[in-house]
Structures are given as C-alpha cells and as structure tokens.
Amino acid sequence: MTVPTKSTATAKAAAPVAPAAKSARTVRTLHKGQHTRAVILEAALGLASHMGLEGLSIGALADVTKMSKSGVFAHFGSREELQIAVVTEYHAKFEEEVFFAAIREPRGLPRLRALYERWVRRVSLELDSGCIYISGAVEFDDRIGPVRDALVSMVRDWHAALHKAIVLAQKAGHLHADADVEQILFELHGLILSLHHDARFLRNPGALARAGMGFERAVQSYATPAGLAADALAKQHAAAAATKKPRR
C-alpha cells in the first residue's frame, strides 16, 4: 500500500471544491437569506400596519424577530430602505388580493365592480391595523424623499389600473360615453377613504354598508342600460357560485 506523503495530503486538502458543490452551497445560502428577509419583511408589515411607517426601526424589528440589529441591518441597510421595502411588499400583496383576482371578471362594469368590492373587502379586513396607503399618505403628505415617492408611485399605479377599468367599461358600452372618467375614479376613491375614516376612527358600524350604497349610486348615475344588464348578470353568476356546493 502506498502511504500518501505530507505534500500529497496537503495538496488534496487544498484542492478546489467542485463547481457543483459550490453551486449547491450558494443556492442554499441564497434560499436561507431570502427566507430570513421574507420573515423580517412580514414582521415589518405587521409593525407598520399598527405603528405606521414612521414607527419602523431596525431596533424595533430586531426585538420582534428576536434577531440582532446587525442581522436585520444586513438585509436592510437603512431605516429608509426598510420602509420602502415594506411599501413595495404591501403593494404586491394588495395587487394579488385585489387587482389580479378582479381582472378575471369580464371587462366592463362587472370587472369594475369586482375591483371596488375587493378593495372594500381589503380595507374592511385592515380596520384593526390600518391601510398603509392611507396611513402612509397622512404620515408623508407634507414630506419629500424616497419613501413618499414610493408611496405615491404605488397609489398612482393602483389609480391607473382603476382608470383603465373605467375606460374599458366605457368602451364596452357599460358606462355613458360622456361620463367623466376622472370624476368616477375620484368618487370611488372618496368612498374608500370615507369607509376607512368612519369605520376605523369613528367606529361607525354602518360604514361598510354605506360604502356599498355609494357604489350602487355611482352605477345608477353612470351606467347605461347595457351596463346595468351586464352588472345584474354578473351578480347573479356570483351569487350562484357562492351558493353552489362543492362536489365530494
């Protein structure tokens, strides 16, 4: 048997790690880092919902996640970066729950209704914590900087989606051709702001119903007979789907 010399053993120990092993190790590290960042971000969303974006800090987040400040800082280099990441994550969740779910509906008034009703549902579920779009606007309305810019960008993106839905409803013949698209958008957003204020601040139990009535009034004001018919049919389909028992 040949006994390896000291130089041979040293050479083997110093041999480079195979590329495949390096790649697997890198992937595991990346996945772990992404998971940790996601956990921190979820905790940050919870803090921001209850304390506002200004209530966020690396220290507060370290306490909640039971991590070191340096550990949190490694994923978010500054408080401002953390705030922007929270706004971006909130917007992604909002899009998933409201926009992407609603655009499955047919273009026209049925889709516009779905967007509004899912928006209302989202706000109603956030009454105990708060809508970051709305609370963030109050916190940053008179400030300048990247956090405000991020908030404004996200809200404008949502307004653009609503604007497009209203225009498509108009093109489908569901809304009067001379209806003011910007006015409709303004009224719908106003209903949401009123809902948030009356339900969250005034604790008015009738706020949710009034938000629904406000939308129905807008429909009656701006919809064409064809739009009302399409809307009624969509509501019938939704009611039937809701009462249909799942197959065993």
Image: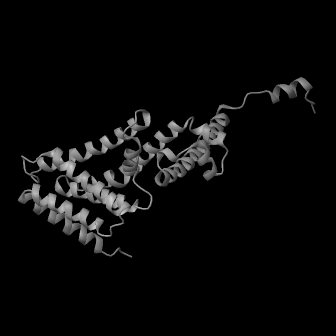
Q: Residue furthest top?
A: 7
Q: Quadrant of residue 231?
A: bottom left
| Residue 65 place in picture, x, y as percent | 62, 51
- Vertical position of residue 233 compared to residue 17: above or below: below
Tell how many labels.
0
Left or right, residue 183 beside residue 238: left
Q: Which image quarter is the N terminus in?
A: top right
Q: Nearer the viewer, residue 62 or 110?
A: 62
The residue at 15%/61% (across/down) is 217
Report the colour scheme.
one colour
Residue 188 visible in the displayed image: yes
Q: Quadrant of residue 142?
A: top left
- Vertical position of residue 225 compared to residue 186: above or below: below
The residue at 28%/57% (across/down) is 194
Left or right, residue 132 beside residue 27: left
- Vertical position of residue 26 compared to residue 108: above or below: above
Left or right, residue 194 beside residue 5: left
The residue at 63%/50% (across/down) is 63
Q: Which image quarter is the C terminus in?
A: bottom left
Q: Nearer the viewer, residue 233 or 129?
A: 129
Residue 167 visible in the displayed image: no
The residue at 45%/58% (across/down) is 129
| Residue 155 place in picture, x, y as percent | 33, 43
| Residue 137 place in picture, x, y as percent | 37, 45
Q: Nearer the viewer, residue 24 or 243?
A: 243
| Residue 77 place in picture, x, y as percent | 57, 35
